[in-house]
Image (cartoon, coloured by chain):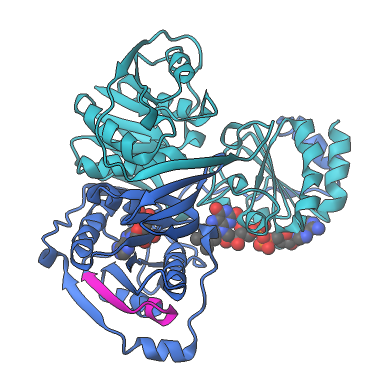
Amino acid sequence: MKIVVPVKRVVDYNIKPRVKADGSGVETAGVKMSMNPFDEIAVEEAIRLKEKGVATEVVVVSIGVQQAQDTLRTAMAMGADRAILVLSEESPEPLAVAKVLKAIVAKEEPGLVILGKQAIDDDMNATGQMLAGLLGWGQGTFAGKVEVADGSVRVSREIDGGTEDVSLTLPAIITADLRLNEPRYASLPNIMKARKKPLETLNAADLGVDMTPRLTIVSVAEPPQRQAGVKVGSVGELVEKLRNEAKVI
Amino acid sequence: MTALVLLDHEEGRIRQAALSAVTAATKLGDVHVLVAGADAVAQEAAKIAGVSKVLHAVDARYAHELAEPLAALIVSLAGGYDHIVAAAGAVGKNVLPRAAALLDVQPIPDVISIVEADTFVRPIYAGNALATVKSSDSKKVLTVRSSAFDAAAAEGGSASVEVVAPVESPEVSKFESVHLSESERPELESARVVVSGGRGLQSEEKFHILDPLADTLGAAIGASRAAVDSGFVPNDYQVGQTGKIVAPDLYLAFGISGAIQHLAGMKDSRVIVAVNKDPEAPIFQVADYGIVGDLFEIVPQLTEELK
Ligand SMILES: Cc1cc2nc3c(=O)[nH]c(=O)nc-3n(C[C@H](O)[C@H](O)[C@H](O)COP(=O)(O)OP(=O)(O)OC[C@H]3O[C@@H](n4cnc5c(N)ncnc54)[C@H](O)[C@@H]3O)c2cc1C
Ligand SMILES: Nc1ncnc2c1ncn2[C@@H]1O[C@H](COP(=O)(O)O)[C@@H](O)[C@H]1O
């Protein structure tokens, strides 16, 4: 079974994002970019399934600008076998990404597609569900545990009140939550090896996908800033302030 | 214009967050709600103020709110609606994007403000920026944050209930089991007071030091990702960018450093209290009141003082 893992290049999670002065978006020029943390978890899960003998090949895909190949190389250094870069604008919408991925799935015929649950830049949490819809496949979103048995996959999902187990007929879609695994670091020799692994580049147009966004950004603004308050010296003083100043208790 | 709200429920009760989705929908027009499974919930739904019709899908395949059948059902009903809305919880986030894809629509998740029928504000980058987006799709599919809209009154309405026929969908998923964390406390997303603990609580056993305080305040208990990952509390306690978004009147953070991903989930609380032994902890930058000190001394003292 082949596994496809879509990986997105995003502003590194350690960087505090800055809104551009003209309100058109968030500054990405000259900012450290990394693989979306949830996608590292997705790549790790796919590699583990390969190590267990469940999967035979792990193919990573990114839709974005030329530099997204760095992200794909990182995924290959972790252990993915090959990569596909579909060139487009930076940060395409989930609907367009899902359509591109559907075309890739038609070519690659994987048994599983494992995505991140959410890209930490647009915070959409949508692409996996949309791809599952377009393909008519089952979806195991927010996965905390994945077990593949013959012909199906059992997924433990993180839901509002706890966890829920579902089983899905293969092929299926999984989106990785934080606790699915702890991704490995790529070792130096593997980083070197990854440079020689195959990376194919395509255009969205070659796949017949219209990437025109449906959402226009009217403006991007800083959220209202909270003022730091005061440090109090004792529990008594805190309780007094909560009662008489903030009036919340 | 009419909006259809997917009303999610848990253990036979409407989720509080779904009532906030109803409020958001009333800003868009007439409101119909869709209840999948659960007879009692459909009856309760008919009483929600502002709802004019309840669509009740009674077939067994809808009992567990699985995305595959539910998205197909929503698509079959979508013709009559301009907006399809759900709370931005586990059900809405699972089902609505799938339905949107089938409708060839780009969904708009986590709406915090409705500017116009086609223009919405949503946080991006863990809430470090607010994007105002205008949709060109003929239908709008959105999830809304319960922290940004008051809950609709659970009583006062008298909607008609209409049973909707099941529709075909690929039979590719099966519900196996559910494990809900047991708690007598209020729902985290709608609690007036939240007591939250982080890695500073050290262990599952020690985390219980927060229980008497939460009891005294009638509070829900939340946690940072580190506390959940370390196994102190179940996953559904996580507050943050990728956990629950809360905006209570009072949020008390104990042993939480204040990473941006955590702040994303609680910085809209009305009053924030932080207790941390590190005076430089970033949580103090958003706290109205802070105490620098050992939480294991402060929590029992605070509980005593409040009794
Ligand atoms: C993709 C992604 C998504 C994430 N999503 C979330 C999310 O949704 N929610 C979330 O919370 N995090 C999230 N995180 C993790 C986040 O970056 C932080 O790692 C996490 O919030 C840290 O938790 P903490 O504050 O409990 O732990 P730490 O950062 O380790 O802080 C512990 C604090 O406790 C204090 N302390 C220790 N002992 C005591 C004591 N006895 N008395 C008083 N204070 C004490 C310390 O001074 C310290 O400040 C995410 C990270 C990533 C990469
Ligand atoms: N441009 C992209 N290229 C590759 N994968 C993507 C892209 N956008 C989203 N994804 C995948 O979809 C997941 C969810 O993203 P989102 O729906 O944007 O929050 C991510 O974690 C990735 O696995």
- Between B175 and B126, the one nearer to me in the picture: B175
Q: Is residue A88 rendered to the left or right of residue A181? A: left
Question: Is A77 colored magenta in this rendering?
Answer: yes
Indicate the quadrant where residue B210 lies.
Answer: top right
Q: Is residue A213 rendered to the left or right of residue A16? A: left
Q: Which chain is blue?
A: A
Q: Which residue is drawn at 19% across and 40% down?
A: B137
Q: Is residue B170 rendered to the left or right of residue A225? A: left
Relative to B16, does residue A46 appear above or below in the rendering?
A: below
- Between B77 and A35, the one nearer to me in the picture: B77
Q: Specify the segment rendered in magenta.
A: A75-86
Where is residue B258 drawn, in percent x and y?
63, 56
Q: In which quarter of the image is the C terminus of chain A?
A: top right
Colour in which the image shows chain B: cyan
Question: Is B175 colored magenta in this rendering?
Answer: no
Indicate the quadrant where residue B190 lies.
Answer: top right
Q: Residue at x 41, y 7 (%)?
A: B158
Q: Quadrant of the N terminus of chain A?
A: bottom left
Where is residue A160 drawn, in percent x and y?
53, 40
Residue B128 visible in rendering: no
**In the image, farthest residue toward the front:** A150
Quarter of the rendered image showing ligand 1: bottom right
Q: Residue at x 33, y 61 (%)?
A: A113
Where is residue A41 drawn, in percent x and y?
47, 65
Q: Is residue B299 rendered to the left or right of residue A228? A: right
Relative to B273, does residue B146 appear above or below in the rendering?
A: above
- Between A237 and A210, the one nearer to me in the picture: A210
